[in-house]
């Protein structure tokens, strides 16, 4: 991934041209990782509170999951207990959880910071089975308040649409 | 913490027109007319985008020249880059730990079976 630090350096020294696509890339972080473990195991590690506690916090921190409402719109709250004795809570909601295991998580705080920011960080995680191993793709995007609100509205509409389709199923079965 | 500056930077970068303008300005200072050229957009709409970039501190306007050229300011972009880099490190570490945890899980399972 090209990053702004490189672009800035190039700009200062050579005034090299920035491509628009580079600017787009630098608004989001994409990380891919293949785990030598079956998909079910990896997915469970992401979606079970006591398992999240095992890997989420930074090294030397104990993580406690104090809230975990794993459904669209449900809240989560983790508290990271630092070696210095301080507690660092992180909070957010689950935005979307799709049937093909794509999870979008909104985060309202940053690790190490107690106060809420004016923006939201959206992390979308996809899990893919590749011959017994699991490929995880994580996209991390900063959303301004304005965009987050728009997303919220979209999410609400999406939620309604799926409620209606469920209603139709129920009605059809009756 | 996500500072007001970071928010303003990311909000400004959220729009493709503004990103294209910044890419243009990275090539050198430009007039509003020159910036507007690639877009099928009214001049007031273009001005509005430039205002957003100015408010975010990503663009400054020349005072002297009659045509008040726009100039890119790299500092907020650098700050945004640092923020992203920090997050990248956090996630890399997290995923390393997840990898270790998954390995442990499977080792235990293998031992018990």
Image (cartoon, rainbow, N blue to C red):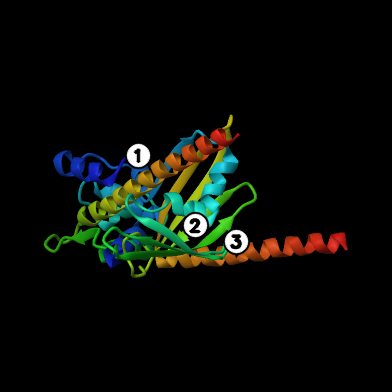
Quadrant housing the C terminus of chain A: bottom right
Q: How crowded is mark 2: few (under 14 residues within 10 Å), some or many (20 or more)?
A: many
- Kind of element beneath mark 1: loop
Q: Mark 1 points at which residue?
A: A1
Say which mark, if any, is on residue A122.
Answer: none
Front residue of B73/A74: it is A74
Q: Which chain carries label 2?
A: A
At which x and y percent is residue B82? 26, 51
At which x and y percent is residue A71? 60, 61
Kindly report the distance in space between the C-alpha atoms of the residues bearing marks 1 and 2. Answer: 22 Å
Kindly report the distance in space between the C-alpha atoms of the residues bearing marks 1 and 3. Answer: 32 Å
What residue do we see at 50% from left, 35% from top? B107
Rendering quarter of residue B63: bottom left
The outermost residue toward the front is B112
Q: Name the residue under label 3.
A: A71
Marked residue nearer the N-terminal end (1 or 3): 1
Above or below, A44 relative to A161: above
Q: Are marks 1 and 2 in contact (CB under 8 Å)?
A: no
- Residue A164 in view in this figure: yes
Q: Mark 3 lies on which chain?
A: A
Q: Name the residue under label 2.
A: A105
């Amino acid at each position: 991934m090209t990053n702004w630090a490189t672009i800035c350096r190039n700009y200062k020294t050579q005034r090299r041209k920035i491509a628009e696509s580079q600017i787009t890339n630098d608004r989001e972080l994409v990380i891919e990782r293949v785990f030598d473990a079956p998909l079910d195991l990896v997915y469970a590690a992401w979606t079970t509170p006591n398992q999240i506690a095992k890997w989420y916090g930074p090294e030397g921190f104990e993580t406690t999951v104090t809230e975990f409402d794993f459904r669209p719109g449900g809240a989560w709250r983790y508290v990271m207990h630092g070696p210095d004795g301080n507690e660092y809570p992180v909070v957010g909601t689950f935005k979307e959880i799709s049937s093909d295991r794509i999870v979008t998580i909104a985060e309202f705080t940053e690790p190490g910071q107690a106060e809420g920011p004016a923006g939201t960080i959206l992390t979308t995680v996809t899990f893919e089975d590749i011959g017994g191993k699991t490929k995880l793709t994580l996209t991390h995007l900063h959303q301004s308040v304005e965009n987050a609100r728009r997303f919220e509205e979209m999410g609400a509409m999406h939620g309604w649409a799926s409620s209606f389709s469920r209603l139709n199923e129920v009605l059809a079965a009756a | 913490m996500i500072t007001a500056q970071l928010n303003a930077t990311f909000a400004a970068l959220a729009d493709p027109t503004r990103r294209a303008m910044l890419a243009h300005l990275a090539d050198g200072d430009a007039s509003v007319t020159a910036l507007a050229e690639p877009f099928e957009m009214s001049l007031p709409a273009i001005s509005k985008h430039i205002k957003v970039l100015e408010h975010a501190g990503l663009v400054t306007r020349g005072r002297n020249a009659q045509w008040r050229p726009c100039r890119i300011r790299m500092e907020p972009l650098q700050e945004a880059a640092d923020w992203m880099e920090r997050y990248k490190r956090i996630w890399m570490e997290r995923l390393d730990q997840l990898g270790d945890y998954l390995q442990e899980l499977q080792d235990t399972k293998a031992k018990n079976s």
